Amino acid sequence: MATTRESPQPPTRRWRLVGPGLVVAATGVGAGDLVATTVAGSRYGYTLLWAAVVGCLIKVALAEATGRWHLATGRTIFDGWRTLGRWTTWYFGIYIVVWGFVYGATAMSASGLPLVSLFPEGPSLRVWGMLSGVAGLLCVWFNRYAVVEKIMMVFAGLMFVVVVSLAIRVGPDVAALGAGLWPTLPDGSVVYTLGLIGGVGGTITLAAYGYWVTAKGWTTPRWMPMMRLDNRVAYATTAIFVVAMLVVGAELLHSAEIAVASGDRGLLDLGEVLESRFGSTTADFFLIGFFAASFSSVIGVWHGVSLLFADFLVRTRPALAGRAAVAGEREGSLPFRAYLLWLTFPPMALLFLDQPIGLVIAYGVLGSFFMPFLALTLLYLLNSGQTPLSWRNGRLSNAALAASGVLFVILCVQQIRDLPW
């Protein structure tokens, strides 16, 4: 299903081609992950640092497995899911429609929050959110993957520089940082620790990694070493980013016993703390990084999940998908752009509602099932006869996918238990 021509043989200096991994990592690390990591630092100091690092390692295993399936078989992940039975098509079809509707509003709201704080005399949160959604739509609608990747690299670099600079500014306790790598569970932290492991950089966009690898022009097994390097560089960068955010929470909030809200607005609380301690320039600098993290997720989801939806429609309703999409031109195809519109405009209605309880509950139930679905289906597919023998899972891959599957099942059960029944 290549959407671009295959690139030439990988060059000696392969690091120059790194890209899809950073796109998937930057997309997965949004405002919610910033809050979760900061709150972890504010509550437990450096104690849960090991959990954040383990979370990054799990995402390395999941993204590598997705990319390996695409390169080893020449088939998409959705094509693999379909071989498991019709239930996968029904599940994914319902999930991607509901998820896109609710996530669209969530992402637009998260992107609007820092802009409201940066420009208090400007438009309202709703208007900034809508403008962010439309800006994401335009970035993806008129550009192919190569340009989208460059845009994402700019925003990923910006949020990385901002967060690491803040961590250096507040000054990490190096000894405590090293001690935090030893697995420890403070009282009452089990569920929170599991959430931190499962949440950092983990979304439906992990399934989109293989599509971005293909769009990059990596379409055969000879690109496997490049894909693995790309994936490791991306999540090593994510690990540094997460550690830096934990440092900010531990040094700025934990030592002063300052609490922040658990939602996206918790980052605005952090901005106020930064302003009181370091001045408005530092606070504005942080808000710019907050926007970069949120808006990079908008662009990444708008592009990556639209590719997933286009492949879904091609496999299930080729007559509706159109000739271009069936021929392999997913970007710019009718289903690709239809899902772009679905992500952008219908969710704007949610920005006018205070508590869309029913939809949020449905989203929570469906969403909690996706990560175990991804981990366990990859575990099956990469051990089956559908994968060439030389590219099937080894012991380490099997252990990582099985462990992540169990972890996400536990998180799924916990999330369902926490619903307001």
Image (cartoon, rainbow, N blue to C red):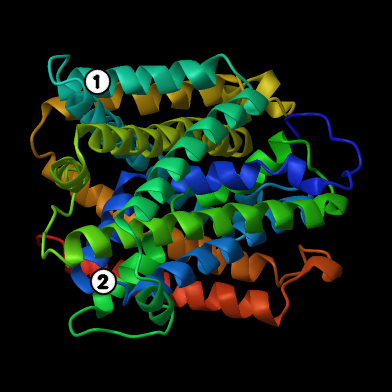
Residue 223 lies left or right of residue 25; in this view the side is: right
Name the quadrant of the C terminus: bottom left
User: Tag 1, which secondary structure?
Assistant: helix
**Which of the 4 quarters of the picture holds residue 413?**
bottom left
List the residue tagged with mark 2. Answer: 45
Task: Give percent across and percent down for residue 35.
Answer: 26, 53
Task: Give percent across and percent down for residue 103.
Answer: 32, 39
Q: Tell me: residue 5, above or below residue 194.
A: above
For marks 1 and 2, the one nearer the N-term is 2
Residue nearest the observer in this picture, 287 or 406: 287
Question: Local crowd at mark 2 within 10 Å, few (<14), some, or many (≥20)?
Answer: many
Distance of label 1 from label 2 (alpha carbons)? 34 Å
Residue nearest the observer in this picture, 77 or 270: 270
For this orientation, the residue located farthest to the right is: 9
List the residue tagged with mark 1. Answer: 128
Q: Residue at x 59, y 52 (%)?
A: 234
Label annotation for residue 195: none
Task: Give percent across and percent down for residue 346.
Answer: 29, 23
Amino acid type, callout 2: Gly
